[in-house]
Every structure is written in structure tokens, then in C-alpha cells.
Amino acid sequence: MSGETLALAHHYASLDFDAIPADVRAEGKRMLLDTMGCVISASDTPVGKMVSQLGADMGAGRLADGTDYVARSYEVGRLGNLMDLDEGYAYCHFGAAAVAGAMTVGRWRRVSGRELLTALVAGYELGGQVALGIGPEFKVQDGKPQGRLDVWGIAAPPVFAAVGAAARALRLCAEQSNQAYAVAASNMPIPIGGKWSTEVDLPNTKYGDLGWCAMTGVLGAVSAMRGTTAVPTILDGDKGLIRIVQGGDNNSRRFLARLGERWHLRRIFYKRWPVCGWIQYPLAALDVLMKKHDIRVDDVTEVVVEVAGGALIPRFTNTQPEGFVSLQFSIPHAIAMLLMQVPSGPQWLSADRAATPAVKAVRSRIRVELSHAPQSYAWADPFSPADAEQNVLSAVRVTTTRGTFREESNFIFSENRHPHSAIEDAQVEAKFRGLVAPPHAQRLVSLVRDMEDLDDAGRLVDALYAALPGADPDYHPS
């Protein structure tokens, strides 16, 4: 065999722990800790409990030898992305799928901590290459975005993140990994973002279910290990998968560009608030305003949020969101939660809290309008110079009893590639500890910190499962 798909498979199948730069390994650990916090916190929400019950229906937690990896991959993958509090990368997020693939298969195969971290990095990097090849979900003309594509979705990067992590945890050779990619890609969820985004009252699933994506990737890797084959050139040429689900910039060969020279983990961002990435920008501006001028919610008479055209759509401007996912995509609700100083996490997404007169009253004072600043909002290339702006300028104008104040933001709060907004270890750990009960938080922080020394990474995975609020007290890992 030869071709583009095999080139990717050979690269990631041969990835060795010592070949991963120290800062990339450190970022992989930070992303792992952050994702586990999202998984644990989300599992205690009403939708999270439903997800865990579905996982249990499929056998999650019932098999101490780790052969419940399929059910667990669904559970971990979907919970990690459930609150939209997980990491992001340029146009999408797929870290939860990489974590699900690495941890569930790693637990089954009893890999070491070094092997688990290598698998996690391999999965994330593969997902990043595919995301880079697909590009953003915008029509592009003369280098400028012209609105979203009719067909788009983010199923492909998380499926590849999961299959890449699982294949590496299984130590599949290049040819087997090639088949794993092909099996997973042939069965990945279809991109429904274009249809999903027409809804205002959103269902409790998003434009892509990372549980299904993670499960598809894991099954693809194990299927290939057992001998299943698929079209080995699935990514190759004009009829390859990348072209089928491609974004609007028509650059399908970019997914092989400079393979091995750049690391996607160096370009991820972490979220402070459980909302879509588009909303992180105005929230960052409001956060600065509140601290700079000591703004209190009771003093606020009006808030005007200026956003790029990509965010001026009904689900983002909805002043009366009700469902779990609708709350994640409402700018007025997010602004209200920050003004009311509700702790970031599940409480932001409580339907009961959202329905209270107090919250509705604050939301009624918030207006969203189009920013007149120059915008590209198609996301800059994640490998552009570190000081390049994302060009999705947002601003918040708050009128209070003491006057009117305005702040602009062109960066997500903790975007790693920008020096002035890079996040520190202490911030990731503080976010994690804010989401996880102290005894479990301390154990997981310690295990992740020293995971290279673990002979059996199953200890880390078991600690994650034990921290889930609905953990089975009768589950005794081997």
C-alpha cells in the first residue's frame, strides 16, 4: 500500500514517547486533566446522568478487565464535550474523543503511563491534521468568509482523534493503523451541522456527538486489529474523505503539510466558561470590565454585546433559552451568568436556574448587535505567528448607574498560541479542582502529574471512573 492515508498511519504508528517534545507531553497532560474535569462535572447533570445510564446499558463499568471499552468510550467521549467546557482547537474540539480512545483502550490493554500519554498525543495530533485539512465551515471567496456552508460538521476530527489514540494504545503497525483509520472513517457520523444550526430550541445533542465519534474510532481500531479491512486510501485524492467533508477554503492536501514538524497541542485553547467558543470572546471582555470597574449586576441597566456576523444568528441571540444545550449557545444567558457571578460549570446550565425571574430579568437587559469592526471570523491558521489576531473581534458595552464602560476582546481567555493569553498550569489545575470533589481531585492531579512513572495506567483510568458521581460502589477493578 502507498498513499496519503498510509503516510499518516506510518507517522503516528511509529510515534515514540521520547520523540514527543517535553512541552507537548506537558500539554497533553494538561489537556487530559482538563478533560477529566469536564467528564466528572458533566456526569452530575441531568443529561450527564442520562449518558451514563446509556453507557451502563451497554455494559460500562460491569467488566473489571476493561473489555467494556466500547461503552466507556461513548460515555467518556460524550461527557467530556457535554457542557462545551472542553478544550478547543481552531475550528472545533476533539480532545474528549482522544482521551476516550486512549484511556478506555489503554485500560483494557494495561498500558503504562508513558504509553497512555503517547497514545493521547498521537490521537490529538491526528485529529488536528484532519481538522487542518478540512478547514472551517465557511464559504470562502477571495480569502474572505461568505457565511457558513450548507453542509458542515465536526465528526471527522474527533473520530480520527479517537482511532489514532486507540490504534497507538493497541500498538498497531502502520498497515493496521491504516486499516483502522479506514474502518473508522467509513463509519463515522455524517456532518449534520448545517441542519442542526437552523434550530433555535436545541436538542440535548450538538452538531456532533463526541460519544458516537469516540466509539466509532475505538471500534475502528479494534476491528482492524481483529482483521477487518476497509478502503485503505480513504483520505487520498479528490474523492477522499477530506474532500467530501471539506470546509470552504478548498485546501484538502493541507492535512499532510509539514507532517511531524508542527504540534497541534501547542495551539489549543482552554475554556473558562461552559459555552460555545464564539461566546468566550465577549465573556473575556466582560470579565475585564467587571474587574476594572467593579461592576455589580444590580447596578447594570443595559449590556450591548458586539459580535462578528458568524455569531449574530438566532441560537446565539436567544434571550429565552431553556434546554441544556440551548443555554450553552445563548449570548444573553452567558452574559447574565457572568454578571451574576455564577461559578463556571454545571450551575451555568441549570434549566431551573435559567427559568428564575432573576435570571430572566438580567437577560432582558442584554442586547446583541453586529460589530462594525473589520472581521474575518473564519479563524486564522492555528500555525500563524504567535501574535496574529483571530479576527473575530467582540466588544461589550455596559451601562451602569455610574456610567457606561466598553471593552474589546480579540482573543479567547486562555489561547495558548498567544503569549499574552497563554494559560498556566495553576489555572488548569484550579479549573479542575473547581469541578471535582477534593479527594478525587487530589488523587487525579497527582496521578496525572506523575503518569510517566505509572507501570499500569489503569490506576489513572480507575480513579477517573471512581470520581464519577454515579460510580457503582460494587465496581472493583482488577
Image (cartoon, rainbow, N blue to C red):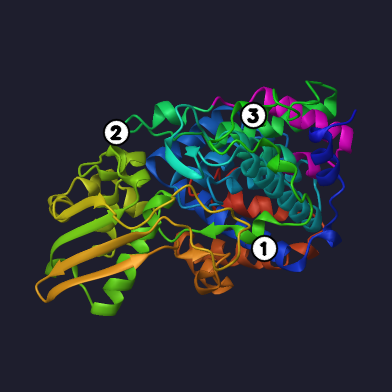
Residue drawn at x 37%, y 44% is 310
Residue 221 placement: quadrant? top right
Label 2 sits on residue: 200
Left or right: where 368 falls relative to 115: left
Tell me the tag on residue 243. Answer: 3
Q: In the picture shown, does residue 95 fall above or below 273? A: above
User: Which callout, 2 or 1, points at the residue further toward the start of the chain?
Assistant: 2
> Label 1 amino acid?
Val
Q: Is residue 225 visible?
A: yes
Residue 72 in picture, x, y percent from top left: 62, 38
Q: Report the amino acid beneath label 2.
A: Val
Residue closest to the eye, 246 or 278:
246
Q: Is residue 472 left or right of residue 15?
A: left
In this rendering, the label closer to the viewer, 3 or 2: 3
Q: What is the crowding at mark 3: few (fewer than 14 residues within 10 Å), some, or many (at least 20)? A: some
Q: Which residue is drawn at the image coordinates 80% and 47% (left, top)?
A: 110
Placement of the N terminus among the 4 image quadrants: top right
Span of residues in magenta: 165-190
Asked if marks 3 and 2 touch (Cβ < 8 Å), the reply is no
Q: What residue would you read off at disc 1?
A: 448
Can residue 181 be found in the magenta stretch?
A: yes
Disc 3 to disc 1, C-alpha distance: 38 Å
